[in-house]
Amino acid sequence: MQPRINDKVGYHLIQTFQCHKLSERAQDKLHYQLWKHNDTGVLGIALSKNESSGGFSAELILVEDVMQTLSQLHKEQKPFHATAFKELFTGKSVNNSSFFGAVLVDQKVIRLHPQTTRLLEVIEDYELWPTRLESIPVAAVVDEVPTSQGNGRQSKKRQGKPMSTAHTEEVSPDADCTH
């Protein structure tokens, strides 16, 4: 198990989303969260839950860093594998890249390549994504404990203790995901 990264200090949760994984065979969903820095307004995305097996790193990925990666991929004008997002993560889970690719597909920033399975491409209006994120309202919150293991269960250490992270029940009308 990777050490917990306390990278959300100074941020507040805007909203939690659910999305499908990249594989058409996968039936369970991923949960991810949009965070905003209290002072600077910087936005970040973090994976928060995997409804099935498969670990991931729940670290905060800054939207500005994602935009730099997307800009480079867009300039190359070639389909790419989800591993292109590996450099965004400090954590070493092999699932990080593909799970984050699923998040970006859900956010309509990238799409599955129409002719080649397992390849992705940047959507032409990807540069509008930060503006769309800014327009997402802060949702009402209920408690949830995200786990870096991704199974959605509380560890024995956490059972009966106050929960420190939030889960929202609203979803942006722009997001292609369900609760």
Image (cartoon, rainbow, N blue to C red):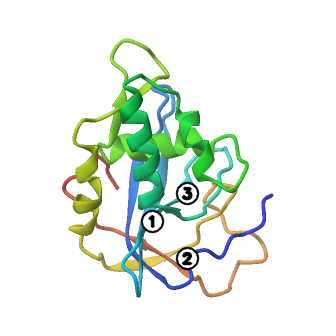
Name the residue located 40 percent from the left edge and 73 percent from the top edge. 42
User: Which residue is at a point 29% across and 77% down the rendered structure image?
Assistant: 138
Q: First in sequence: mark 1 or mark 2?
A: 2
Disc assigned to residue 158: none
Q: Position of residue 8 (x, y in %)?
A: 55, 76
Task: Describe residue 28's horizontal placement relative to residue 145 as left or right.
Answer: left
Q: Secondary structure at mark 2?
A: loop
Which badge, 3 or 2, comes first in the chain's sequence? 2
Q: Amino acid at mark 2?
A: Lys
| Mark in the foreground, 3 or 1 | 1
* Image quadrant occupied by the N terminus: bottom right
Q: Taking the image as drawn, is residue 20 in sight?
A: no
Assign the C terminus to one quadrant of the image. Answer: bottom left
Total labels: the figure holds 3
Mark 3 residue element: strand
Work out whether residue 35 or residue 64 is closer to the camera in this orientation and state it: 64
Q: x%, y% of residue 126?
A: 28, 44
Task: Tell me if residue 166 comes above or below residue 64 in the rendering.
Answer: below
Query: Closer to the camera: disc 3 or disc 2?
Result: 2
* Alpha carbon distance from label 1 to label 2: 9 Å
Residue 49, disc? 3
Report if the CB atoms under discs 1 and 2 are less than 8 Å apart. yes
Q: Amino acid at mark 1?
A: Gly
Q: Which mark is residue 44?
A: 1
| Spot occupied by residue 144 in the image (x, y as percentages of width and height) | 52, 72
Amino acid type of the residue tagged 3 in the rendering: Lys
Label 1: element kind = strand
Label placed on residue 8: 2
The answer to whether the residues at label 3 and label 2 have Cβ atoms under 8 Å apart is no
> Residue 143, relative to residue 24: is it above or below?
below
| C-alpha gap between disc 3 and disc 2 | 16 Å
Residue drawn 65% across the image and 63% down it: 147
